[in-house]
Image (tube, helix red, strand yellow):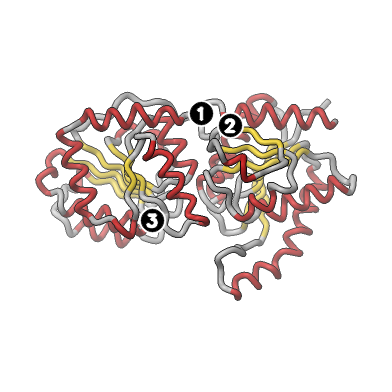
């Protein structure tokens, strides 16, 4: 019997893609000769991350539906027939044993096509989705009614998928994410990032806050991932401050996140599920600034889970001022015990075997139906 084939579909954010890569790595670790590939959306971050991880990527032309203008919705609707045709071509050519949707618009037509071909008897394929957030997004709410298995990162999310076989696995993350020693406060290093696309709200908060922390400049260090679009503006703004350039690192995108986490005293970041899973894995204290326009406000709900457990601070973007962050940094610089308490609490959310659980279940279902 040949090694089982897996296709992972989805993307649009680094969190979606990297969770898929973690599952792909685990699948390939069990079956080194297995064909593992990805299907994503044209123009998404997956075009950079998937090839870098060593996997083939097929692309669909597909846009968004929920929360978009009528014009964008019409354009997306016009793209759907070709997306379904392209999905069928890929599936019938590759004939995977399993398909996993990790979120993002491309996963919709691809998994729907996989289910339809399976129902028609043209394909024998186990289908599943991974819901990474505490509140399911639009695509996964639809797909959850059709696929055979649902994996959930947060306890309680399974209630959104009645009648489905669900597993609480946590969120898969890269194996390079390891528990770090407790952070140092000398230098006091703020690592700010807004996900794969960056975050203007976090960028502005950091620029305003660093300008107010002049008394800490001798022992303050900043690592700042800005995103590509905001890089030049942020870099120029920092250059106008008196902050020492030798203590500043500004990047469009940081691929070696473990190295940056290791240097950080505290994180300032969004609260997508993959980010939270990495924070828990490395054991770093974090100020969570939820993306205010996330569908169904899921990032704030994710952050509240961590905040209520004493595992992070939360600052609502529209309600937060630079003084709020600077006050916290000043206090933590003098009270490392508070940092250490957050580091200890956040590690309780670490699920080291999420990818292994997902692969184990998918393999058992795929082999059972064959």
Name the one closer to the observer, 118 or 42: 118
Q: Nearer the viewer, mark 2 or mark 3?
A: 2
Question: Which of the labelled discs sits on residue 351, or is there none?
Answer: 1
- Tell me the crowding category of disc 2: few under 14, some 14 to 19, or many 20 or more residues within 10 angstroms, Cα based: many
63 versus 110 height, above or below: below
Residue 261: x and y in percent read: 35, 35
- CB atoms at circles 1 and 3 under 8 Å apart? no
- The answer to whether residue 7 shows anywhere in this view is no
- Tell me the crowding category of disc 1: few under 14, some 14 to 19, or many 20 or more residues within 10 angstroms, Cα based: some
- CB atoms at circles 2 and 3 under 8 Å apart? no
- CB atoms at circles 1 and 2 under 8 Å apart? yes
The secondary element bearing badge 2 is classed as: loop
Name the residue carrying label 2.
Answer: 169
Answer with the quarter of the image where residue 256 lies. top left
Name the residue carrying label 3.
Answer: 199
> Residue at coordinates 15% horizontally, 34% vertically from top-left?
334
Residue 366: x and y in percent read: 78, 32
119 versus 165 height, above or below: below
């Amino acid at each position: 019997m040949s090694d089982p084939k897996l296709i992972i579909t989805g993307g649009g954010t680094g969190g979606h893609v990297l969770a898929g890569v973690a599952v792909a790595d685990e699948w390939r670790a069990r079956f080194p000769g297995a064909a593992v590939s990805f299907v994503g959306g044209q123009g998404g971050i997956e075009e950079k991350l998937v090839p870098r991880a060593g996997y083939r990527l097929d692309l669909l032309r597909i846009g968004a539906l929920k929360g978009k203008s009528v014009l964008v919705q019409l354009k997306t609707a016009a793209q759907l027939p070709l997306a379904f045709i392209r999905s069928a071509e890929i599936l019938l050519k590759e004939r995977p044993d399993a398909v996993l949707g990790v979120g993002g618009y491309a996963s919709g037509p691809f998994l729907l096509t996989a289910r339809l071909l399976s129902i028609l008897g043209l394909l024998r394929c186990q289908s599943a989705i991974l819901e990474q957030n505490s509140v399911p997004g639009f695509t996964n709410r639809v797909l959850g009614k059709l696929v055979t298995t649902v994996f959930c990162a947060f306890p309680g999310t399974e209630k959104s998928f009645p009648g489905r076989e669900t597993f609480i696995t946590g969120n898969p993350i890269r194996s390079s994410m390891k528990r770090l020693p407790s952070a140092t406060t000398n230098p006091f290093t703020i690592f700010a990032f807004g996900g794969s696309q960056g975050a203007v709200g976090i960028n502005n908060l950091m620029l305003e806050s660093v300008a107010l922390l002049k008394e800490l400049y001798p022992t303050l260090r900043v690592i700042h991932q800005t995103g590509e679009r905001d890089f030049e503006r942020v870099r120029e703004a920092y250059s106008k401050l008196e902050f020492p350039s030798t203590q500043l690192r500004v990047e469009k995108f940081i691929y070696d996140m473990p190295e940056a986490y290791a240097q950080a005293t505290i994180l300032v970041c969004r609260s997508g599920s993959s980010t939270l899973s990495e924070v828990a894995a490395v054991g770093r204290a974090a100020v969570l600034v939820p993306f205010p326009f996330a569908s169904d406000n899921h990032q704030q709900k994710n952050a509240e889970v961590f905040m209520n457990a004493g595992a992070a601070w939360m600052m609502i973007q529209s309600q937060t001022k630079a003084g709020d962050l600077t006050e916290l940094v000043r206090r933590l610089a003098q009270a490392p015990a508070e940092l250490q308490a957050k580091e200890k609490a956040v590690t309780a959310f670490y699920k080291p075997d999420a990818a292994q659980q997902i692969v184990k279940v998918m393999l058992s279902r795929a082999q059972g139906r064959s």
